[in-house]
Amino acid sequence: MRLIRNLACLIIFLMPVSSKAQFNTNQLMQTGRIALQYEDYVLSIQYFNRVISLRPYLYEPWQLRAVAKFYLDDFVGAESDASKAIELNPYISQLFDLRGIARIRQKNFQGAIDDYKRAIKLDPSAQGFWYNSALCYYQLKDYDNALALSDSIIKRWNNTAGAYSLKAEIYLQKKDTTQAAQWLDKSLKIDPYNADAWTTRAYMAMGKKQWKEADGFFTEVLRLKPTDVNSYVNRALCRINTNNLRGVMDDYDKALELDPNNFLAHYNRGLIRVQLGDDNRAVEDFDYVVRMEPSNFMAIYNRALLLDRIGDLKGAIRDYTTVINQFPNFWTGLEQRAWCYRRLGMTSKAELDEFRVFKAQMDKHVGIQRRWSKAKLREVRKRSEINLDKYNQIVVEDEPEVDHEYKSGYRGRVQNRQVDIDMMPMYMLSFEAYNNGVLHYQAFDRDVERLNAKKGSEHKLYVNCNRQSLDTLQIQRVFSMVDTLTARIEGTATVHSITGKGQQQLLSLLMTRSVAYASLQNYDAAAADMTTYLGVDSTLSLAWWQRAVCQSLYMQSFDNSDMTQLKLSQIKDDFAHAISLNAQNAYLYYDRGNFYAKQKDYAQAIDDYTRALQIDSHLAEAYYNRGVTRILANDKKNGVADLSKAGELGLYEAYSVIKRYTK
């Protein structure tokens, strides 16, 4: 009778898992949201694509796909999808915010202003809409409208520091430094952590050539916004003027670490390397600049001088020739090219250049020396006033600009937002081997190895905690795998009786499909497969473990307030069952520790991490998470000691956390 009941339950459960289940748009939407929550943007787009193909009249999948594209820096695609969502439902203010911020990233400030006007009509209480609109007017140099909106913000929300600092910037652009200083003081009085205000104050100090003070202000900015590239570049300029060359190089190196394509950092670092005699590495910087801007003749000329100095005469001649072809009257360049020709034994070419210089000197004597036109000067370089006589001067932007942080739910990549601290993720079953940067360690569990031996070589399973985001091709392969497994599961359930070899084959297929679902972040379906598995065989620790982890990850995509006590109890029970069947599995204690830490039950979490380490003293992630948990529980001393051990084992992220919490 028990066998018949199990068979009936299994068939009832499997009936919805047919091809029709793929058309469950609610489930697809929820899984897409989870992938978006876990920053797997490419995967989330695949889910939303499926919903859109089935229900193109729903605005929400268009909206969420726009969000995913925005975080992937596809601002054109984000704007297009947001526009479609607006077409389907023009009464949602967040849609205009989304399209507005996508337009801002494309520097379409007027289009963004139009969006924020509509957003304000729908929701006039959203302060961010007003503020972003004012910033857009400022970017368009429409200072009157920017001031008017700033005044409106201050009238409605008088504690908005950003509005005060924006007014300060506007007055600074109007050359009214007195008013600018007054509004800055008000801004910093309300919010001393307003990075924009400190940036404006730094620019004011730079304008007065108060380099040391400006250095201090930019340092304050970087304390608040440690990834602000412009502040590193500008602080380097201040340090050049205080002869702090070590600090200069550190700032340019950091700027290029954050933004490898930053023109000013490459160009100016190249100039500093010349001063320090590091000619070969200076050439590398100017190579990069010339690749970025092939018509930047100042960079080409600097590279020519460097190549000349290090003995690459042919390369130097090439660059001198490029500049001379653009500026035939550049006599210094002709003299330098002639000297390169002479050293290569190309006497006739050297004499031709020398004769041109001699003739030019005679022409100048009788008053017919031609001058460069303003158009030619603009072609030389797109930044600041340029003259080839100033080839060795540091380059600055034509106008200093504050890198404003727009107030929106979509300000930038989720991974770039400042969070308190990240925990290492849970261990779970995966098709990928462990590769978390820890050398000489491989995650291993005896039950997994036994399962692989039963399954054979097909779809080998591993224990892993650092699942990598899949690209589009990999996603399609896993979707195809799920479809194939589903067909085989249905066939197994109907062709075989639920005993012996048929039962084992069915359980193996369910386990594999659960792991495939989990790799697609469809944790609800992954957990459901394990529920089916446990209905047939409740003796495998792995099944309880897999269900506990998948349900935990599924629930983490919601706010804690949405977690029912029933679900939380079920997850705890699943971990307890798994541990009772395999008490020497360190990963089970580690994962349960993560579960408790998420619930802010730090004492229980620390106990579980400790038990995991008693079983496997090389489990670096357990040291890391126990260290973080101890810090959150105000035990900084022991927390830092744990993080130090994690770093010693190879989790080098631990050192940045130590640095942060030991300042």
Image (spheres, rainbow, N blue to C red):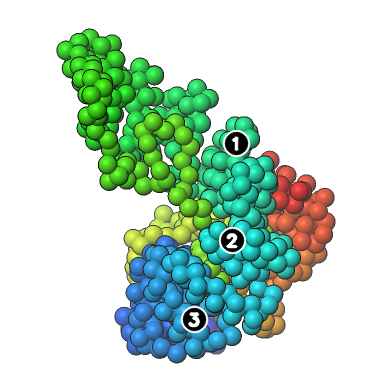
Residue lying at the far front in this picture: please name it.
366
User: Which residue lies at the image location 56% right of the left edge and 53% below the top edge?
Assistant: 228
**Residue 115 placement, left or right of 533:** left
Between 313 and 167, the one lying in front of the other is: 167
Q: Quadrant of residue 302?
A: top left
Q: Nearer the viewer, residue 268 or 654?
A: 268
User: Which residue shows up at 45% across the image and 66% down it?
Assistant: 141
Amino acid beneath label 3: Gln
Estimate the x, y position of residue 136 in percent, counting from the top left: 47, 70
Q: Position of residue 558 (x, y in %)?
A: 60, 77
* Residue topped by disc 2: 176
Residue nearest the observer in this picture, 43 or 501 = 43
Dividing the picture into quadrants, the one containing residue 161 is bottom right
Query: In the rendered image of this protein, does residue 153 appear above or below residue 291?
Result: below
Label 2 with label 1: CB-CB less than 8 Å: no
Tag 3's secondary structure?
A: helix
Q: Where in the figure is residue 555, as x and y percent of width and height?
A: 60, 75
Residue 94 numbered tag: 3
Determine the CA span between mark 3 and mark 1. Answer: 46 Å
Query: Whole-Å distance between the Cαs marked 2 and 3?
Result: 37 Å
Residue count near mark 3 (Cα–Cα under 10 Å), binned few <14, some 14–19, many ≥20? many
| Circles 3 and 1: CB atoms closer than 8 Å | no
Instruction: Describe the element under mark 2 as helix, strand or loop.
Output: loop
Count of residue discs = 3
Q: Which residue is mark 1?
A: 241
Q: Amino acid at mark 2?
A: Asp
Q: Nearer the viewer, mark 2 or mark 1?
A: 2
